[in-house]
Image (spheres, helix red, strand yellow):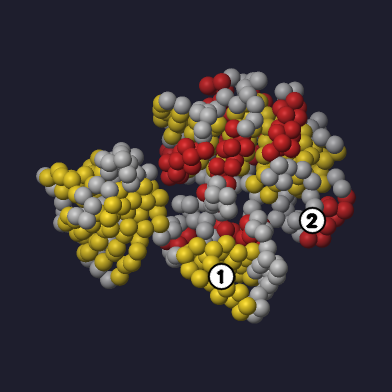
Amino acid sequence: MKLIPTILCGGAGSRLWPISRESHPKPFIRLADGQSLLQKAWLRGAALPEVVEILTVTNRELFYKTEEEYREVNTTGIPSAFILEPFGRNTAAAIAAAALQTVSRHGEDTMMLVLAADHLISDQPAFAQAVQLATEFAATGKLVTFGIHPDLPETGYGYIEADGNQVLRFVEKPNLKKAQEYLAAGNFLWNSGMFCFTAGTILQQMQQHCPEVLSTTSACLAQSRSAEGKGITQLDLDPKTFCNVPDISIDYAVMEKATVGESAVAVIPCNIGWSDIGSWTELGNLAVPDENGNRIQGQALLHNTSNCTIQSNDRMIGTVGVKNLVIIDTPDAVLVADKASAQDVKHIYAELKAKGHQAYKLHRTVHRPWGTYTVLEEGNGFKIKRIEVKQGASLSLQMHFHRSEHWIVVSGMAKVINGEKEFFVNTNESTYIPAGHKHRLENPGMLRLVMIEVQSGSYLGEDDIVRFDDNYGRT
């Protein structure tokens, strides 16, 4: 049996703002052990037997960040495959593309294990056992989902009504009264959003229940560009045809319909230490509480404070006479919320997005394929950045119309193109890039290049740029 863990890495994680942003969504949040949720998903799949590769479906803008996350934990050289979406089209499109690609490269009998990139599973042996049972059902032509035994009347999850391994029906997120009834009934499970099936089976079921999704996705793949290198394959979905794919979840498109009549869907009830980390309350609960029930990450001084979740990596947080609060501090945004309303943080995110405020999308530190930049300060006519460039990486050959730049190397060595000149700038040296000059920054050394960039001009927006040559497509 060939097994391909298929990781779906999408979504904004709006309920975990301000740590989660559009360009740094929930899967990239690092936990106390230093690993991100995405890395844990990769390791979870990689630890299973008979894995031939790990396939990830993600947004094109997140590819380099995802690849770097995997590189940190892939110590055994498991091959990676990527399907890169130009924009989100929900889980049915992602799974259709993954299944079509899997059949093309590995055959219809290949087993697919669909995992979310932002879930947490604490019991790996129990998870492996559940996957083994799921593959046995999937080998008989079943679509298999994983149901979690509930331990409280959770209103943030969908439910599965089951009779043993048979799915009777899928249920939407209930109100509290319904959730209490489901818990008391004893045969309702939380819908984990994880699936197992052969690539051929899911394509057959999609042909039956959502043929438009399958046909439009297939047409898109026919127009998409692919590339293959050592241990990695990459498929860039064509945006012109991908926009024709219906925006619908796999639950609505296939799973709910496949339970009608003689059900084609099986469920594996399991206790695997699962959570989808859907709010700051859930994420905070991963930390060990103090004697007053406070869960703290970073620096905080508390007086007469109880049952609070507090996170601050850079600044000291002081609290007096408060309880049941979530307080999250980042360099450019602070969240204060009642724990009872933790699910409603998404409304702040949505309003920021509607207003076009960059705090919904970017952190003050922005990741790029070549490294990072951090906005240290900005004001009328100036902006100061700290730039880090990875070893061997370079920015695009570019030009700005409205701003000039001063570059000061703090550590490492820079190779610079400035107009017609090409030269090196060493530590504690600087150079000046006038507006209108073609220029490029490169790190030719063995250490990270760290430099300070001071911009000045009438307009300092990131869109004041003309790119002439770019190793990464748009950086």
Residue at point 69% right, 38% down? 124
**Cα gap from disc 1 to disc 2, whole angstroms:** 31 Å
Q: Position of residue 376 (x, y in %)?
A: 35, 64
Q: Quadrant of residue 39?
A: top right
Local SS, label 1 = strand
Q: Is residue 50 above or below residue 322?
A: above
Numbered circle sitting on residue 300:
1
In the drawing, does residue 173 fall left or right of residue 399? Answer: right
Judge by depth and name the residue closer to the eye, 178 or 218. Answer: 178
- The residue pinned by badge 2 equals 152
Residue at point 42% right, 25% down? 230
Q: Position of residue 286 (x, y in %)?
A: 65, 55
Judge by depth and name the residue closer to the eye, 382 or 388. Answer: 388
Q: Decide if residue 383 is in sight here.
A: yes
Residue, far left: 420
Q: Position of residue 337 (x, y in %)?
A: 61, 69
Q: Decide if residue 220 is in sight here.
A: no
Residue at point 26% right, 66% down? 382
Residue, far right: 185
Q: Amino acid at mark 1?
A: Ala
Do the residues bearing badges 1 and 2 touch, measured as CB atoms within 8 Å? no
Q: Amino acid at mark 2?
A: Leu
Local SS, label 2 = loop
